Amino acid sequence: MDVNRRIHRGRLIDLNIETARLPDGNDLELEIVRHPGGAVVAAVNQNEEVCLLRQFRHAVNQARLWELPAGRIDATDPSPIVTAKRELQEEAGVLAGEWRDLGRILPSPGFCSECLYLYLATELTLVTPDPHEDEIIEITWVPLDEALGMAATGEIIDAKTVACLFRATWRSGE
């Protein structure tokens, strides 16, 4: 018996109170964030450098975080790979000739439906970035092993970036 009551409908997310039947048969009211999902891209050039973005994030005390290019799936074309290609070009100014699916992750499944699709992009061509007006982005190319070190030491704290860097490194040798 699932019953939903929308508390808020926003540009990026919906917040619901949902009554869920648990596996033991009990009902429980849960606060659930409904999110359309997104795509994350580890773009690695011929020099084994990965494109990292230094991006302003108000939600975490106006910090500038190291992140990979990423974005929300658009309702007009809900394909994760289309999202990945769009975000890589818009945020980083990069087109890729080769794409490898790195699977998906669930960043916060205890309260959020968001699913992120991870990709490794290679055979890169630089073009002009076209970020949205609310995106304050600094583009940097870092050796992939250095980026992994930044994730291991906590310099990179964005979870989607840590996961995608790990998967890109693990899968790039296949």
Image (spheres, grey):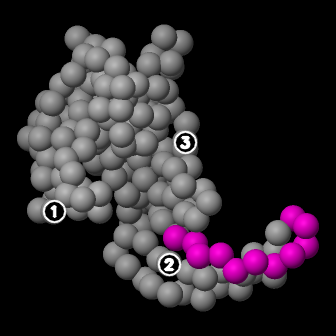
Q: What amino acid type is highlighted by mark number 1?
A: Asp
Q: Nearer the viewer, mark 2 or mark 3?
A: 2
Q: Secondary structure at mark 2?
A: strand
Q: Does the segment drawn in magenta span residue 135?
A: no
**Eyeballing the image, is 157 above or below 12?**
above
Q: Are marks 1 and 2 in contact (CB under 8 Å)?
A: no
Using residue 18 as the reference point, say whether residue 102 is left or right of it. Answer: left
Q: Which residue is mark 1?
A: 134
Q: Cα distance, mark 2 to mark 3? A: 23 Å
Q: Earlier in the sequence, mark 2 or mark 3?
A: 2
The amino acid marked with disc number 2 is Leu
Instruction: Please tell me which residue is depicted at 60% across the width and 56% down the height of the picture.
Output: 109
Q: Is residue 126 above or below residue 22?
A: above
Residue 66 in sight here: yes
Q: Earlier in the sequence, mark 1 or mark 2?
A: 2
- Upstream in the sequence, badge 1 or badge 3? 3
Location of residue 169 (image quadrant) = top left
Write the start and end of the magenta stretch as one range: 23-33
Give me the residue at 82% from left, 69% from top. Answer: 22
Label 3: state its secondary structure. strand
The residue that appears at 43% across and 53% down in the rendered structure is 38
- Where does label 2 land, which residue? 15
Residue 82 can be seen, yes or no: no
- The CA distance from mark 1 to mark 3 is 26 Å
Q: Which residue is mark 3?
A: 104
> Which of 131/6 is in front?
6
